Structure formats: structure tokens, C-alpha cells
Amino acid sequence: MKGEGHGAPGAPAELGALRARIDAIDDAILRLVSERAGIAQQVGRAKNGEKIYRPEREASIVRRLRENNPGPLSGDTIERLIREIMSACRALEETTRVAYLGPAGTFSQQAVHKHFGREVDALAETDIDACFQALETGRADFAVVPAENSTEGAIGRTLDLIVASPLKICGEVMLPVHQMLMRKHAGLAGIARVYGHAQSLAQCQQWLSRHLPDAERVSVVSNSEGARRAAAEPDAATLGSEAAAELYGLAVVQARVEDDASNTTRFLVLGQGDAAPSGRDKTSFVMSTKNEPGAIVKLLQPLADAGISMSRLESRPARSGNWEYLFFVVCQGHRQDPALAAALAEIEARAAFLKVLGSYPAAS
């Protein structure tokens, strides 16, 4: 009893001392963030009209802080914090306009915020075509478009558009996609139909078959449209993000109903030019083969000879004729790296068509 009585009076004093240290640290953080913002303004003035956003520079900052992170905060948390600071500093110089596949509340909007932070002018577009058009016409500075999903594969429309577009890939975003089932009130009882984008419905088909086997599945243009409808229909539910639930005032009935817990969508960041080398980069290109035996093997051989790792190979029908295909390749390295530059030159000499779509920092 004596020991307990001796320890108790010291606890409030110790707690007060810890809180005082936190207050002092918060004051130091405020001073340092303000100092960083001031220096960023000086850098902006020194650029003399150059673009404020430098994807390779921001990627190298994020990578360095993640690698040097001592904990206990996770690397993802550190990245989110520094990207928001960079976003706020960038906004002091200019407003960055980013087109994305809308409406608000979609996973595409989440990808914009993950990559650029929230201090941007996010422009919700009606479809992927409109995202390209917004950037090509100068209405947007960048565009974020879905490229592939780990469960459902490539987004064909994005690949088709990027072949003919002058735009370049200057970044990528890997977004874990967690589908929520939401409706006006809690509980699964009484759900007659489930709205969702076709990709979302496909990503959750096993869960829906087990838990809502009799509910109609209705494909809509976006999960936000599904949320809008579910907000007006008591017997309906929708799939989508937590942000959509908040935006439309819906209750999350069940979180993470996707069939694959590692479900991830890869988004491309498009700009008028690609990025300079960051130290850990990828290069995307598209090619077509001459009509001869073993042509695709011959095209890829220069990458193998140079020891360059290829992370993706995707084929799409070409519009030039029946049974002709384009091959989309993602490989490690920057197009300015001597080994990759030489390999691309050799591929171009062998290919019927070659277009480098961009070099960009690899996502964390």
C-alpha cells in the first residue's frame, strides 16, 4: 500500500511534463514547416517560370524519408505527412490542376490526394477520355487515370488512348482498394439490389454471392453514382470507398468486402512531359512486331541481354488491322540510363512500331 501511495502523486506530474514536451515539439514543428515553406517560395522564384511540381524531386524526398524513418510511425504515414506538406508549399506558388475520373468520392480522387496531396484543384471528369482532353487542351496540368487492377487486369481504354496521345507518363500511384458495402442504415436485411462500378462488382462477386445471393447487382458508371442512388433507396446498397459513404451520408454495413485482401489499382500520372531520373524509376513503352515467327521474343531480347527487368507485358488489339496487336511493356530503369537507352534503340530497329510512353519514379 505504501508503494502505491508513493507512486500515485508522481503520475500527474510526469504526465504534465510529457505534455509540455509535446507542446514544445509541436512549436518546433510549426517553426520548421514555416521555414520550409519560406524556402520553397524562394526556390519557386529562382525557377523563373519553370513548373513548380517536379515528380522526380518529390519522389526522392519521399523515398529518403521512408528509408530513414526510425518509427514508430509507419512509412505510409510518413509519406502521407510529407506529401501534404509538399502540397501546401507547392500551392503557395501556383494552383496545380489535376483531372481525374470522377465524380467526387471515387478511388481515382483518392489516388490524386495520395500523390499530389489535398492542396490541389482536383477536376472531376466524366470519363477517361475527358481526363486526357482536359490535359491536352491545357485545362488541367496533370491527369490521374486508372491503368490496371491486380484482380481484374488492365484498363483497356487507358491503354488505347495513351498510344495516340502526345502526353507522357510522369508518375504512378499504387492504391490499395478496399471496397465498402454501404446503405442508408446499418444491417444486411432488406437489401434488394447492390449498385457498383463493373470493376467493383467483379472484385466483390464472391462476397456478394455468399452474403447477398438474392440481391440484384446493378452496374453504374461510378461508385459515387451508386452511392447517390443508394442514398435515395432504402432497399438498395452500394459498393465504394469510405469517402463516398461520408460524402453521401451512408452507413458502412461491412468494410473490406473485396474478395482479394491485396486488391490494388495502379494509376498513371500523365503530364506534358515525363520525369527526370529519380534513382529508382520505371519506363513504359508500346511496340508492335513485324509479322514473322518469334518476333516478340526477338523484340524483348535486348532487355534480357542488358539485364533489365520487365515487370509487365500486356497485349491489346491494334486498330491498324485484324489480328494485329500492340504490346505494352513496363521495365525497370529510366530511358536516359545508358543500358536501357541502348536496349530501346535496338528494339526500335527490330520493331514495326515503338513509342516510349514515359519514364517516371517507381511508386513506393
Image (spheres, grey):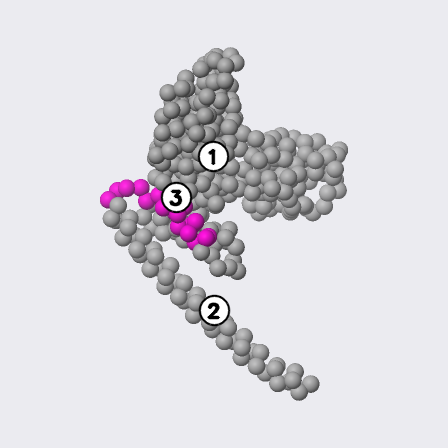
Which residue has dot 3 on it?
279
Which residue has dot 2 on it?
22
Q: CA distance from mark 2 to mark 3?
A: 36 Å
| The image quarter in which residue 4 lies | bottom right
Point 53% across, 40% down: residue: 107
Residue 163 % position (x, y): 43, 24
Point 50% across, 73% down: residue: 18
200 vs 345, left or right, is right
The nearer-to-camera label among 1 and 2 is: 1
Q: Amino acid at mark 2?
A: Ile
Circle 1 packing at 10 Å, graded few (<14), some (14-19), many (20+), is: few
Which residue has dot 1 on it?
309
Q: CA distance from mark 1 to mark 3?
A: 15 Å
Circle 3 packing at 10 Å, graded few (<14), some (14-19), many (20+), is: some
With respect to residue 239, does 70 lie above or below?
A: below
| The image quarter in which residue 245 lies | top right
198 vs 135, left or right, is right
The question of residue 267 being in magenta is answered with no
The first of marks 1 and 2 along the sequence is 2
Residue range in magenta is 48-67
